[in-house]
Image: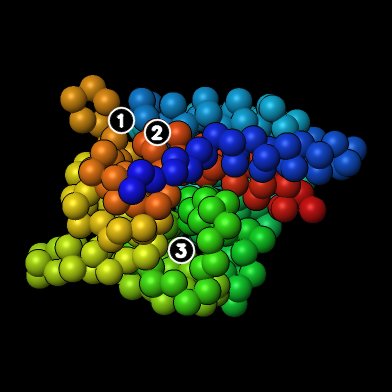
Amino acid sequence: MAAKILDGKLIAVKLKEAAKKSVAGFGKSPRLVAVQIGKNPSSLVYINFQKRAAESVGIEYKLVDLPESVSQSEAERVIGELAADKNVTAIILQQPMPPAIDAKMLMDIIPPAKDVEGMHPENLGRVLTGDNRIGPCTAMAVMALLESTGVKLYGKEAVVVGHSDIVGKPLSLMLLDKFVTTTVCHIATSERGALAGYVGRAEILISAVGKAGVIKGDWVKDGAIVIDVGINHRDGRIVGDIEFEPAAKKASYITPVPGGVGPVTTAMLMKNVVELAK
């Protein structure tokens, strides 16, 4: 079996077209403000992606660049001012942040109505109740990719590898909302030697670990839908968590890395800005 490639770029184009149409009807461009602390090369790449995506749909993008030496109190003051500014529609904190900065405290300052990443406890609570208008962008991107297959999700067995607050946990709730039987695996699953067994039973496999090749291609169940969230650098290339070539021989659908989840995640960020503007 040769898997069909799930082209995230095509899905992203459709999402951005819908966002652009909504923005055109507002009469005033929404404003997305990104806050970066320090100079992290990987963060700069994401900022450029975000800026281009925002401008392509008519969203104003502004970067607030703070030095790595900024104090916690000063960073909180800046976030607080953005939160109170009526001209700011949405706020995103660029990760990673310097070790001296408590990122969670900064995120808690952002009000739910400006939380474009969907990580405020109030917005996460809405995900719990099935309201995904504003949700974590990567988790929402995975759901969009799954839905693009046209496969009926109801009753399918899914395995999510990785239980982060930004992907694994909210994604498991979104899958449950679609009546998918969902198992979440993590480092303890692997340390127990049970990961391959769980992966082998998955009709839907999603990995969001951030470790190249952590999931072997021959573990994948025949006909599985495989979504690889991982972004890893290996031998000068960007690769996912799952061994792509052997997995693609067994899966029915599979996302490439890069070009799979990433573009859809950025498009979901724009969708969230539009929802916050509404």
- On the image, numbered disc 2 is attached to which residue? 258
Query: Identity of the amino acid at label 3?
Result: Leu
Q: Label 1's element?
A: strand
Query: Identity of the amino acid at label 2?
Result: Pro
**Against 73, is 151 above or below?**
below
Q: Could you tell me how far apart the alpha carbons at marks 3 and 2 are, in whole angstroms?
A: 20 Å
- On the image, numbered disc 1 is attached to which residue? 238
Q: Could you tell me how far apart the alpha carbons at marks 2 and 1 are, in whole angstroms?
A: 7 Å
In this rendering, position of residue 234 left or right of residue 5: left
Q: Nearer the viewer, residue 192 or 276?
A: 192
First in residue order: circle 2 vs circle 1: 1
Circle 3 crowding by C-alpha within 10 Å: few under 14, some 14–19, many from 20: many
Q: Position of residue 115 (x, y in %)?
A: 60, 54
First in residue order: circle 3 vs circle 1: 3
Q: Position of residue 154 (x, y in %)?
A: 52, 74
Residue 246 in view of the camera = yes
Most extreme residue toward the top is 236
Circle 2 crowding by C-alpha within 10 Å: few under 14, some 14–19, many from 20: many
Q: Could you tell me how far apart the alpha carbons at marks 3 and 1 are, in whole angstroms?
A: 23 Å
Q: Label 3's element?
A: helix
- On the image, numbered disc 3 is attached to which residue? 171
**Against 35, is 144 above or below?**
below
In this rendering, position of residue 186 left or right of residue 9: left
First in residue order: circle 3 vs circle 2: 3
Query: Identity of the amino acid at label 1?
Result: Ile
Which corner quadrant of the image does residue 59 belong to? top right
Q: Position of residue 224 (x, y in %)?
A: 36, 58
Q: Label 2's element?
A: loop
Q: Pointer 2 and pointer 1: residues touching (CB < 8 Å)?
A: yes
